[in-house]
């Protein structure tokens, strides 16, 4: 029996954009928001598609002042030509992130490497979508952000003082292995979006992922009060790194993010960091056996996956498979429970709902 229903991308984008515009966002912001949501769904990222995006905006964004529809990005002065500092003024995170990647690529074309630090931001959701786009355009890309809330307990602690704080890398490797290598993960064992997904689908969390309000381990998504970092002290270190970046860029106390009210002079906004590298800037020009740079990458990947490692895979391979399945189905794939939630949004907006009995299955 099929697990998914197929929603034509145009129908999805129209509904999501309409929802954003109903909250005051410009047509351009709404289109950028819908694009990231669609790409997340297309690549099987069930934790950060439109349902999460609109829910996050309702809880912490346009409804509460955490995100400001129509805000303009302010580019701040700097003495470093390959670096830019932005004040996002709480503009929609997806809009800021797409523009940051575009600008970083422009700078990398000129200087070989570029970075953009963004203060006063609103969560950009799936970081992998931005670095994947850069990788598909031929660039190495990295981003991290501080999350909208402090939901993660530090290693050895008991109170959540860290965000889920994702890291995302994109590698332009399609010519070598057929798809861009993308490493993208929250530094908690699972993302809070995953908890929401499991709750929607009536499923349990893996052991060691979360604690309840009393600090006791739980696998029940309805009882989750805080999350745990993956990999013990190692994941904690990577989670902490985002908070350090945030502190240096302009973010304030993690336990204040997304919270109201604020004391005078305080801040509760996330920060973003982006880095893009032109492949020529990395090349030492002396590859073994006369190989080119991309040929050398292909040879290295072949060696890693060889020697009987038949069960090994590359980061981004699962997402590439989901994309292939989605494209073959002719639309975006959602579970019946997800379609039901989309229909609740459509009904609230006075739009026609999707008839599940007439939707294609995949």
Image: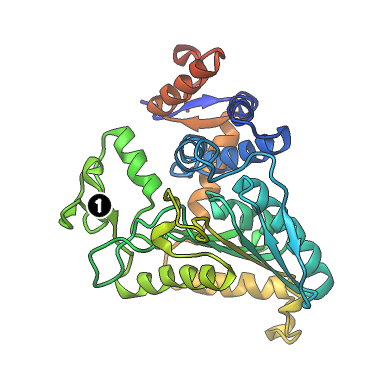
Mark 1 crowd level (few <14, some 14–19, many ≥20, 10 Å Cα): few
- Residue 209 lies, in percent from the top left, at 27, 56
Residue 96 seen in the current view: yes
Along the viewing direction, whichever of 9 and 353 lies nearer the viewer:
353
Label 1 residue SS: loop
Q: Which residue is found at the position 77% from the left and 69% from the top?
A: 77
- Residue 308 lies, in percent from the top left, at 41, 69
Q: Which residue is found at the position 37% from the left and 46% from the top?
A: 194
| Outermost residue to the right | 110
Along the viewing direction, whichever of 105 and 162 lies nearer the viewer:
162
Q: Which residue is found at the position 65% from the left and 34% from the top?
A: 25
| Outermost residue to the front | 264
Q: Which residue is mark 1?
A: 206
- Residue 361 lies, in percent from the top left, at 47, 23
> Which image quarter holds the N terminus?
top left
Along the viewing direction, whichever of 135 and 115 lies nearer the viewer:
115
Q: Which residue is found at the position 30% from the left and 37% from the top?
A: 199
């Amino acid at each position: 029996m099929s697990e998914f229903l197929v929603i034509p991308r145009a129908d999805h984008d129209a509904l999501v954009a309409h929802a954003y515009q109903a909250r005051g966002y410009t047509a351009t912001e709404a289109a950028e928001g819908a694009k990231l949501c669609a790409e997340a769904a297309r690549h099987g990222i069930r934790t950060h598609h439109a349902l999460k995006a609109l829910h996050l905006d309702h809880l912490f964004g346009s409804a509460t002042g955490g995100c400001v529809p129509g805000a303009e990005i302010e580019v701040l002065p700097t003495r470093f030509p390959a670096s830019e500092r932005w004040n996002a003024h709480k503009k929609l995170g997806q809009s800021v992130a797409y523009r940051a990647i575009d600008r970083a690529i422009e700078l990398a074309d000129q200087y070989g490497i570029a970075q953009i630090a963004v203060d006063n931001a609103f969560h950009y959701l799936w970081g992998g979508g931005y670095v994947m786009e850069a990788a598909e355009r031929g660039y190495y890309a990295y981003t991290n952000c501080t999350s909208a809330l402090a939901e993660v307990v530090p290693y050895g602690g008991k109170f959540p003082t860290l965000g889920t704080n994702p890291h995302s890398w994109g590698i332009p490797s399609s010519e070598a292995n057929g798809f861009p290598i993308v490493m993208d993960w929250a530094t908690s064992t699972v993302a809070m979006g995953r908890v929401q997904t499991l709750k929607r689908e009536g499923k349990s969390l893996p052991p060691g992922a979360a604690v309840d309000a009393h600090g006791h381990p739980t696998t029940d998504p309805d009882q989750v009060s805080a999350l745990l970092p993956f990999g013990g002290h190692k994941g904690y270190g990577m989670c902490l790194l985002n908070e350090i970046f945030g502190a240096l860029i302009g973010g304030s106390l993690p336990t204040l993010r997304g919270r109201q009210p604020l004391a005078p002079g305080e801040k509760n906004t996330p920060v973003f960091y982006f880095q893009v590298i032109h492949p020529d800037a990395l090349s030492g020009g002396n590859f073994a056996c006369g190989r080119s740079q991309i040929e050398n990458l292909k040879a290295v990947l072949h060696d890693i996956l060889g020697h009987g490692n038949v069960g090994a895979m590359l980061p981004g391979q699962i997402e590439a498979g989901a994309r292939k399945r989605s494209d073959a189905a002719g639309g975006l794939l959602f579970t019946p429970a997800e379609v039901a939630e989309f229909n609740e949004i459509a009904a609230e907006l006075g739009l026609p709902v999707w008839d599940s009995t007439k939707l294609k299955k995949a």
